[in-house]
Amino acid sequence: MRLGAINRPREVLVRAGGKGLNAARAAVGLGVRVRSVSLAGGETGQTVRALAPPLDVRFVDSGAETRQCLCLLGDDAVLTEVYEPVLPVSSTIWPSVLSAVADEIDKCDLVALSGRVPPGLPVDALAEIVDLAVTRGVPVLVDSDGPALAAAIRRGPTLVKVNAAEAAAAAPGDLTELQRLGAKSVVVTTGATGARYLGADGSRLTVSHDAIPDALPVGSGDAFLAGLAAAWLGGPSGPALGGLSEPAEALRIAAAAARANARRLPAGDISWDQVKAEMRAVRISAG
């Protein structure tokens, strides 16, 4: 790609994306049955709705134009990302969103909250969903950032999965600070080479693996979340670990899913065979 010049791509891939749909796509690839609730609006939102299948998505009209995100991959394997700003939505749509989520929670075995809360919705939006899940006895995983993340953690989610920067913003210090805030278990990813885990019982694990040359990290955090969900629930080709009763194996699967995702574009296109191939590179140690 050359700045200040016309660039003509050889190939264009168009996908319905965003963190939630990327995580859903990766989980489906690992054999998990997924029903998503997602916001979409405007002409771009119509395109997202049309591109979403075969994902099973319940869309709620945001009343605002859905943003587009561009990933530009050069011949030199350098990836450049251009993200449009997230437009504010009206607070009046929140009851419809919450109602849709409430309907779906009663039909599911696990809730995964993935993505940023758009401006205009209440800061405790995710917290309200965590409350719904906790009240109904459904495990809930949270992957978000900013004030909405901190508010959600205070409601006691089953597990919080964030990157190092998001963790520091929500609760500066060790993983124990996130646990003191309310999370039962915590996973903090540390970039291309691993993650740290703190369990509800106080156990600590470190995930490490070598960096992938020319990695394409778009959606790898979402694939990590999908890997945790797949390990939790199981699928046609994968183990059902019964929650985090075997956290080391769940973390190995999650890290391998993130590695599989980083091998190629578009985000979320992974399979159990690809994950199994990556698991050999993942190391889990105590502490």
Image (tube, grey):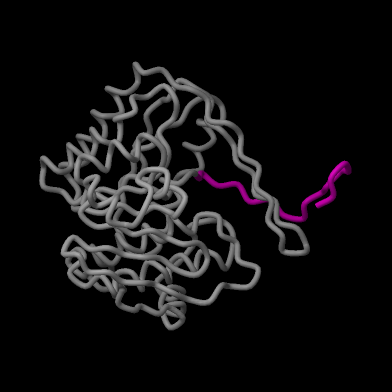
Residue 98 drawn at (x, y percent): 26, 29
Residue 67 drawn at (x, y percent): 56, 33
Is residue 74 toward the left or the right of residue 143 in the image?
Answer: right
The answer to whether residue 3 is magenta is yes
Instruction: Give the residue at the far right of this rendering.
Output: 5
- What residue appears at the point 50 percent right and 62 percent down from the top-left corner? 191
- Residue nearer the viewer, 202 or 56: 202
- What residue appears at the point 51 percent right and 64 percent down from the top-left corner? 261
- What residue appears at the point 61 percent right and 39 percent down from the top-left corner? 83
The answer to whether residue 76 is magenta is no
Image: magenta residue range: 1-17
In the displayed structure, 156 sits above or below 121; it is: below
- What residue appears at the point 48 percent right and 44 percent down from the top-left corner? 18
Q: Quadrant of residue 181?
A: top left
The majority secondary structure of the magenta stretch comes to loop
Could you tell me which quadrant the C terminus lies in? bottom left
Residue 91 drawn at (x, y percent): 36, 18
- Residue nearer the viewer, 284 or 43: 284
Numbered label tally: 0
Residue 71 drawn at (x, y percent): 65, 49
Instruction: Give the residue at the far bottom of this rendering.
Output: 280
